[in-house]
Image (cartoon, rainbow, N blue to C red):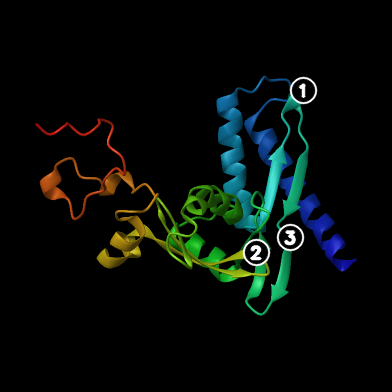
Amino acid sequence: MKKNRDFEFKKAQIEIFVKAEYAKKFRRSARISIRKRQKFMDEMTRKIGKKFGKDVLCLVDFSKGGFTTLVSPAHTESTDLGKLYNSFTHPQVCYTSHCIDRFSQRTENEENCIIKLDAYMNDALLTFGENEGHLACPTGVFAYGVDGGRLIVKTYINFELLSEEQILKFYGPGTATMLPEECLAEDESQTDFMLCEEYSDQPDKPQD
């Protein structure tokens, strides 16, 4: 019951905060463009994450010049691994509090970390099975474990912290992950390693 009261208190506080920010930005009867809505939501995600916590999902309804907020803190549980935060969009994925802290620090991200983590995880899950215990996305690598059918994401290491051996391991030949654009060379002579297509677009030329 205490948890519900805490949630209702936080929800009321966020609604007051969003209402005040909304009043600063828009006239009540004004039509609000998609671009302005996106900009406002980006600002709210950042400010709410910093002020109220990085496990809150806040949605704003701009219809008819008004709005309502829906606040949904991530479901959490205490385990031997510490506090686990459920993903908003991946039902079998949980993030440790350590992972959230490291992700926030290493991406200099004060926004809602779980929303951002879920976006990165869309790419990372495509590499499941390539390197046991690790998932790679274009910006870095996640360390994970599997417990009771759930994927527990333990930490995040951004690309700049990886050694040359780790880059080759996680992003070299045989992996499905795209390298960050800044790491792609225009000239073959500048490359540390080359990625090869498994199949050629053209059939092999017959031997004479």
Residue 4 is marked as none
Instruction: Tell me: 151 left or right of 141.
Output: right
Quarter holding the C terminus is top left
Q: What x and y, as percent, mark residue 105?
A: 47, 63
* SS under mark 2: strand
Going from the N terminus, do you reach mark 3 or mark 2 first?
A: 3
Q: Which residue corresponds to mark 2? A: 150
User: Mark 3: which amino acid?
Assistant: His
Q: Answer with the quarter of the image where residue 73 lies.
A: bottom right
Of tags 1 and 3, the one toward the viewer is: 3
In the picture as drawn, the residue positioned furthest to the front comes out as: 208
* SS under mark 3: loop
Q: Residues within 10 Å of mark 2 (few under 14, many from 20)?
A: few
* SS under mark 1: helix
Q: What x and y, as percent, mark residue 110?
A: 53, 55
- CA separation in Å, label 3 and label 2: 14 Å
> Residue at coordinates 62% horizontally, 77% vertically from top-left?
81
User: Mark 2: which amino acid?
Assistant: Arg
Q: Are marks 1 and 3 in contact (CB under 8 Å)?
A: no
Instruction: Tell me: 175 left or right of 145.
Output: left
Residue 75 is marked as 3
Q: What x and y, as percent, mark residue 99?
A: 54, 66
Give 143 or 115, whichever is nearer the viewer: 143
- CA separation in Å, label 2 and label 1: 42 Å
